[in-house]
Structures are given as structure tokens and as C-alpha cells.
Image (cartoon, rainbow, N blue to C red):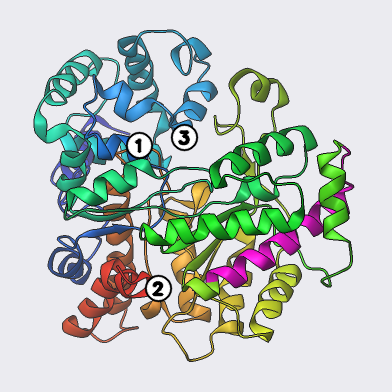
Amino acid sequence: MALTDKNTAYNRLHKSKHSFLDEDFLLQNDFAKILYHEYAKDLPIIDYHNHLPPKEIALNHQYANCTEVWLKGDHYKWRAMRTLGIEEAFITGNASDAEKFNKWAETVPYTLRNPLYHWTHLELQRYFDISEPLNKDSSERIYNTTRDLLKEEAYRTRGLLEKMKVQVVATTDDPTDDLKYHDEFHKEGQNLKLIPSFRPDKAFAVENPGEYSRYLITLGKTVDFEISTYTDLMLALNQRMAFFDQLGCKSADHGLEQLYHFNLGDFDISRLFQQLLEGKPLTSEEIRYFKFETLVHLCRSYHRLGWVQQFHLGALRNTNERMLKKLGPDTGFDSIGDFEQAMPLARFLNLLDSTDQLTKTIIYNLNPSDNEVFASMIGNFNDGTIKGKMQFGSAWWFLDQKDGMEKQLNSLSNLGLLSCFIGMLTDSRSFLSFPRHEYFRRILCNLLGTDVQKGELPADEKWLGKIISDICYHNAKDYFGF
């Protein structure tokens, strides 16, 4: 290219209306901009599923630096750093917080086109008013600026939530959790709602009899009686559900490879339970049956309590045994799995529906090839009793990015009613992750705005604006009863 051509191209680029992460980021037409700025931008956030530590909210924790609040526990960032060849010492190891931040800063420029690039800079802008790109040259300056800001009262956990207009935080809690911090926070009478969600995965994680027996001991201490039979287990879980319900619990969540279906009674569940107590492993089929029957009992209880049940399906977890032994679970060694979903999911939901004990349900897929399966599945069990009773959940985990969100929204639009969708959640362990709601809202507004631009939807600002605000806030508020 000739020098004059290069200069022309350079000038055209820099005269462009678009600059990185400006106010119209991801909004590619005028109608999309109207929908976002007038109907989505200023809505509060209901984060109905996340993994935030309730203790830090109740105690209004103050963070020492950005590494503590931003990098600790974030396996998305850890995976990127490992891919770049950064030593584990600077990821989960003994390096100082400043050294870990510097290594992340060096990584960020290499994450372009990964959602981490957008999330990183959105979070720096929204929480710290920093528009400068993060890289090795800006690392020390940004580290010091954020560290100083985090010393201020407004940057404790509650202040961070307030900055993002968060109204509801629904954490994910094991049946053995005492919910002490939820209770303490509730008694303060804060406007922010901190509520528990019931996550009973360990109650049916029977792959390792030794670990399972130890869990039963912990659960027994929680309910103050020994769990020596399967009936005891059900009594204990029912007791814990009642306790969670008293503290405002609205939903239960489950992380599974897939749902299973059998005929009730195919195996003797009491015998399987005794076998586990004796330390004898179950066969693969017996493990699946144990999960199935236990989930049936749980789901019938959720219906009785009026809770929402959530199923996160399709993760292939802990694939790297060496790193699992070294670092433990949830450290960045999981991936999309390829499991049969349609038939067992349909049969499981049908079993509950056949006795009118199918409560409000959200299903999330991790394999994008299941988008249409899940989007069509919800239509099988909507029965006209509740608006949007069955939900195809927002793009989850590896699909929680621009392309994944658009595909989820398109699949739902094609096969269901987008207007009934309950929208976004963070599913995060970080208090700096709430701009993901903004990211989703921008993508949603651009999707509908583009349809208007193409003449595929009428330019009815008020009606489309209502649909946008419902998806971003009102539908979730009504669905959960917050």
C-alpha cells in the first residue's frame, strides 16, 4: 500500500464514529442506542444466581488491592494466563499481589476477541473510571490507582454493589451452610436483598463413598441427628430446605452433566445408601439412579415450597487430574461436555409434570449444539399457569460472551417467546463482575435495534422499550417474587 493510501486509511479510521468502549459500545444503529440508553441502561440489577461470598457482603469487606477483589478465584483469567505460558506462582501461587496483577496486565492485550478483553476494560471503567487500556506499561499506574480507591468506604463490597445498582444478590449455598451471614445482613434491614439459594449437589455426589460418608457426618451435625438411612437423608434435606425458606430462599440450583431418567424403584435406593455407608462403590448406573431418585424427591419439595429450580447441564469437570490434585476443583480445568440431554431431560420433567409437581424451572446448556434442544424443550412444559414458567437460561460459562449470548437469544426467539425471558446473571465469584449485565443489555438492544433497521420489526419505541426493560429487570423480579 502506498504511503498516501496508508495515511488516508489512518485518517478514515480515526474519524470513525466508533472508539473503543465509548457510550455506544456494541450499539450499531440509532434504534439500538435509543433502546439501551432510554430503557435498559439505568435499570437496577437482579442477580439471581452467583457464587459471591455472603460473609464479605455482611461484613462489608474492604479489599487490600485489585488482585484480591479481581483476580483471586477467577479461573477465566487463570486459564488465559496459563495459555500464555505464565507460571502458576503468578496465578494461584505465592507471588505477591502486585506481581500477580502485573502478570495479568501483561496478559490482557493478548486476550483480544476473548470476552475477557471487554470485561476487563468495562470493569476498570465502571468501577474505577479508568479508560486507559491495561497492559504492562499501564500496570503499575492502574494497580496503584485502584489500590488507593479500594481504601475508600465507597469501595467496600456494599459500595461496589451500589455502584452497579444491584438490588438482589442470590448466593449459592450448600445445605450444611448455617446462613449466618445472610441472617445477620437481613436483620440490618438493608435495601439490598442478600438471599440464599439451595445447592444440594453434595447430597447426591456418591461417586466416592468415603467423601460422601464424611459429608453425611457434616450434614448430620447440621440437623442434629445421625444420618444412617436414606429416609434420614430426605428428612435432613427437608429440614434444611425449610430453614433456607425461612431466610428468603427462592430457588435451588444443580450442576450436573445431564439429568437422568429411570422408573422409580428400578434400584433399591435404601440398599444403595447402605452400600455407600459401608464404603462400597456403586456402579455407574447405580450412581445415576441415586442422583435421579434424590432429585425427584428434591424437586417435589421445591414445588411444594414454590421455589424455582435451576439446572446447569453439560460441564465436563476436573479433566486434568494432575492439576486437580495440586489445586483442587474450580481452578480452570473444566470444559464443555458432550452428553445426551434431550431424552432424559424430557422424561425427568415429564415425571414431575405428570403429578403436577413441576415447579418453575430454568435449564442452562453448556454445549452450544444444545441451544435449540433446550429452547424447544421449555415449550413442552409451559402449561398456561405462569408466564414463562419454563425458562431457557442465559448463555452460561463458556457461552457467556457476545456470540454465545446472541445465539442463545436467537434460539429462544425462534422457538419460544423472548419477551418472557428473565435475562442475565453473573454466575460469578467476583464483586467486579456486574458489568456483565450491561454487556448483555447492550447485546440485547443491538439485536432488536438491528431488526428494526432491517425492517423486520416495527419502529415502535415504547413497545420494544417495554420488552427490553422486562427482559433486563421486570420479568426476573416477577418470576422469583423479589
Q: Amino acid at mark 1?
A: Tyr
Q: Which mark identifies residue 421?
A: 2
Q: Residue at x 33, y 18 (%)?
A: 101
> Gap between marks 2 and 1, in whole Å?
27 Å
Query: Tag 2 or tag 3, which sits nearer the N-term?
Result: 3
Q: Is residue 314 visible?
A: yes
Q: Is residue 182 above or below residue 31?
A: above
> Gap between marks 1 and 3, in whole Å?
11 Å
Whether pointer 3 and pointer 2 mark residues with C-beta atoms closer than 8 Å, the reply is: no
- SS for callout 1: helix
- Which part of the image, by quadrant, shows the C terminus? bottom left
- Which part of the image, by quadrant, shows the N terminus? top left
Coordinates of residue 163 in the picture (x, y in percent): 15, 45
Magenta stretch, residue numbers? 280-302
Q: Which residue matches tag 1?
A: 117
In this picture, residue 299 sits left or right of residue 9: right
Q: Residue at x 30, y 70 (%)?
A: 477
Coordinates of residue 457 in the picture (x, y in percent): 31, 84
- SS for callout 3: helix
- SS for callout 2: loop
